[in-house]
Amino acid sequence: MDEFFRALLPVLLLAVGGVLLLGLWNMLRGGNPGRSQRLMRWRIILQFIAIVIAMAAIYFHR
């Protein structure tokens, strides 16, 4: 179980970073504000999931 969480965490962190960069890129180039909002919401959801997975990895590592 610990290995599963350890493998999943980098994938989630890359997803959070990717969505963050997409949202920032959309805002900087003057794109659709609704799309930027949707991307930032997804970023927050992915950050929450990443934190939960990180806490589970720490819990199961003990």
Image (tube, rainbow, N blue to C red):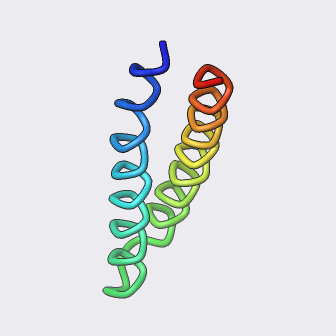
Q: Residue at x 33, y 40 (%)?
A: 11
- Residue 62 lies, with reference to residue 44, above or below; the image says above
Left or right of 13: which side holds 53?
right
Q: Quadrant of the C terminus?
A: top right
- Horizontal and vertical percent for residue 5? 46, 26
Q: Nearer the viewer, residue 60 or 7?
A: 60
Q: Quadrant of residue 21?
A: bottom left
In the current view of this chain or complex, which residue is farthest to the front? 62
Q: Quadrant of residue 17?
A: bottom left
Left or right of 44: which side holds 13?
left
- Residue 45 lies, with reference to residue 58, above or below; the image says below
Q: Quadrant of residue 23?
A: bottom left
Q: Nearer the viewer, residue 47 or 27?
A: 47
Q: Nearer the viewer, residue 37 or 11?
A: 11
Left or right of 34: which side holds 30?
left
- Horizontal and vertical percent for residue 15? 36, 48
Q: Residue at x 35, y 30 (%)?
A: 7
Q: Residue at x 65, y 34 (%)?
A: 52
- Horizontal and vertical percent for residue 56? 63, 26
